[in-house]
Structure formats: C-alpha cells, structure tokens
Image (cartoon, helix red, strand yellow):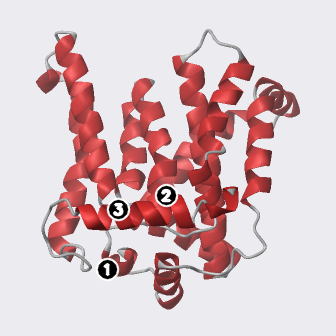
Amino acid sequence: TWMMTYVFLLIYGKEYGKYRGSTAKLKKLIKNNWELIVLVIIVIILSYDPNWYQFKWDGYLYYLSVYDNSLTQMSELGLYGHLSLGFSTIVMLLIYCLGDAGIALQMGNIFVLIIGTVYFYRIVKHVFNNRTRLFCFLATTVFAFSPYMVGMVNYYSLDYYMLCLFPVFVYYTITSNYYIATIASFFFCFTKEPAVIIMAGYCIGMAILDLYNKRNVFTEWKYYLLALPLLCWLGLLIMLGPWVGGNHSVGINIDYIVDKLKVMYVLNFHWLF
C-alpha cells in the first residue's frame, strides 16, 4: 500500500513538479489551462451537498469498513470482501490527513472526480488536437456534469472510483506512456472486480488494433507491462479468496441487473425532476 502511495506521489511530481517554484511557470500553467481550472472549480461547487454525511446503502457499509479498521493489514484493504486496495490506499491517506473517515470518503469522491475530469479533458485534447479549447471544454462537461457523476458524488461506492480512474489509464495508453499507464492500472484494477474485466477488454482491443496494423503482439513489451496488475490481482484473489458476498461463480442475473438500473436511474436521478 505504501508502495502504491509512493508511486502515486511520483506521478504527481512528474506531471506537475515542473511548475513548482516559479511564478512565471505557474502563470503559464493557468493561462494554458484556464478553461480546465474553471471546469474543476465548477465541479467542486456542484459536489457540495449539506447532507453528504448521511451514508446510504452500500456507502454505509464502506464507511463502517474504513471507520472500524486501521487499514494496515492486507486483508483490511479488501473492503467488504472486495479487492479494493486502490480505493483503500486513497481513503487511508485522506483519513491520515483529515482525521475523519466520513470526511475522507467525501473528499475522496471529489478528488477522484477532479482527477477523472482532468484526464478526460486531456484525452479529448489529445484526440481532437485540431479543435478549439472551447470544444475540449464543452466535450469534457459531458463527463464532468453527467447525471451519474454529479448525482453519485455524495454516494460512497467503489464503482465511482472505478469510473473516475479509468480516464487516467486510457490517457497514458493513448499517449504511449505505458510505465505510468501500468501504475495507473494498479489503482484502477484494485477498486472493484469489474475493473479487471474492463481493463482486459481494453487490452484485447489494443491487441486487435496492433494485429490489424500487422504488428506482432508477442513482441510488444507494453502488453507484458499491462499484464502485471492483472496477474497481481489474480494472485491476490487466490491469497485472500473470492468476494465474500457472491457465490464464487460468474454469470448474468437479469433480475439483479434490472434492480440495480432502477436504483441508478430512478432513485439517484430523482433530483432532476
């Protein structure tokens, strides 16, 4: 966990350390990214909810997990039976800094929403590099201001971290920075089990594209790097055991999916109407 924390701080230093210690560089950073800064400020304002300390549904279970545990043992980092070391690492740091599990969960949601918004913006800017900055700003609002992101920012869920951290992984793969992409994928994979399936599917898509471009995927070192978090996840699953809340099998439960969709698109979005 502390290694993951160190690596996270290393990424931060690599990305933003070049602006530190220089007023001129800071002004340049603001000038070149003013629309993103405005977007982040709006995200923070929209994230405010006077009732955010009222824990609902599974969010209350996660609150109890981080409140009752010291998060110092490997087994404690798997909150409520999930292999959620990435989630736990961020929350653990925030609890250490803020001293309150509830505030840490709330600040963690806002933090990963900001991270997801920043990297979604960077993806749009990279893919549509010939478009205006206003276009990139408006395109990013589709992610940052979507009902799911705004509606769920005050609900404490591993799924929320998974969705917000995915753009970080995507950005570093499309910019061919596979070392940092591998590090980001550790945080992404160790949020909740579906993240592993999403990442595996994404890597398969990359491999299909490489095959289409007549590249030998077995000689592409990036796949061996990206396989590390998947192998670590599998190893940890074997060590700690499967999700305690399931029946240790894989399948599709239509009734369960329908119930979850009702919760997501009816109960959580009632404020729109």
Q: Can residue 199 be seen in the rendering of this structure?
A: yes
Total count of labels: 3
Give the number of the mark in front: 1 or 2: 2
Q: Which of these two is toward me, 220 or 272?
A: 272
Q: Are marks 1 and 3 in contact (CB under 8 Å)?
A: no
Q: Work out how far the residue at label 1 is from the one at label 3, CA to CA, in angstroms.
A: 32 Å
Residue at the image position 79 percent from the left and 47 percent from the top: 41
- Say which amino acid is labelled 3: Val
Q: Is residue 119 above or below residue 160?
A: above
- Say which amino acid is labelled 2: Tyr
Give the SS element for disc 2.
helix
- Disc 1 designates what residue? 75
- Give the residue at the far front of this rendering: 273
Q: Quadrant of residue 249?
A: bottom left
- Disc 2 designates what residue? 161
Give the SS element for disc 3.
helix
Instruction: State which quarter of the image contains the N terminus.
Output: bottom left
Q: Which of these two is toward me, 257 or 129?
A: 257
- Disc 3 designates what residue? 258
